[in-house]
Image: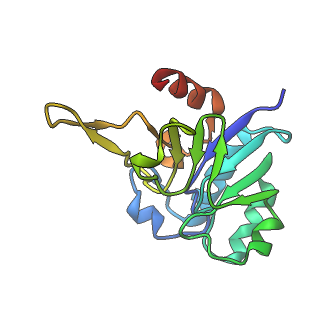
Amino acid sequence: MINTWFTSDTHFGHKNILEYEKDARPFSSVEEMNERLIDNWNSVVGSSDIIYHLGDFCFGKNNLDIAKRLNGKKRLVLGNHDNLPASSYLDCFEKLYGAHFWKRCILTHVPVHPNNLGSRAFLNVHGHLHSKVVKAKTFWNEELPDINYFNVSCEQNNLTPFHSDIIMDRIKEIS
C-alpha cells in the first residue's frame, strides 16, 4: 500500500536552526541533526510512498543531495529559503509547486489568509512556523490553535513526517 506523508522546514545544513529551535533540535552539530532527520524520515516513509515537503528543505546546494538519501516519491512546495534554480530541485523531487490542492486541503509553505479557506479547501496544511501554530481568538478573547490550519513543520512531530491519516482526521473534524 502506498502511503502519503507531509513534512516541512527540515533545514538540512542550516547551522543557525540549532539555535533558533534548540528545544526541538538539541544537537551538537548540524551533521548530527541532518542524520537524525534522515533516520526519522526513512523510519516511516517507504520507497513507494508519496511525501510532500512543504518548503525550506535545505540550505546550500551541497545539501540538496541529502534528498537522494530519503525514501519516497518526493514533491516540494517551495518555501522562502528554497531559492536554488528549479532545475536543481527537479533532480531530487518529482514535482515542484508554489501551492498545491490535495483532497480538501491547500498545501503551502506559509499559512494562507483565512479568507482563502472555504469552498475548495477547508484546511491549510503548511510549514514555516516551526514550533509555533496559527492561533484564533475565541469569543472570550482567548487565543487557541486555529483548527483550519495544520502545521507540518518537522518540530511539530519529533522531527518526523506526518501520515496523511492525521490530516484526514482533521478534515473530518472541521467539515
Q: Is residue 160 above or below residue 76?
A: above
In depth, the one of 38 and 137 nearer the eye is: 137
> Can residue 40 be seen at all in this image of the molecule?
no
Q: Is residue 115 above or below residue 21?
A: above
Residue 163 vs residue 94: left or right? left
**Residue 96, percent from left and from top:** 73, 60
> Can residue 147 be seen at all in this image of the molecule?
yes
What residue sits 46% from the left and 70% below the top?
16
Colouring convention used in this rendered image of the protein: rainbow
In depth, the one of 112 and 65 nearer the eye is: 112
- Quarter of the image where one finds residue 77: bottom right
What residue sits 15% from the left and 37% below the top?
141
Q: Quadrant of the N terminus?
A: top right
**Residue 164, percent from left and from top:** 65, 32
Residue 156 vs residue 99: left or right? left
**Residue 33, percent from left and from top:** 57, 57
The mark tally for this picture is: 0
Extreme residue toward the front, this view: 119
**Residue 59, percent from left and from top:** 60, 72
What residue sits 63% from the left and 59% below the top?
34
In depth, the one of 45 and 33 nearer the eye is: 45
Residue 42 vs residue 162: left or right? right
- Quarter of the image where one finds residue 67: bottom right
What residue sits 76% from the left and 32% below the top?
3
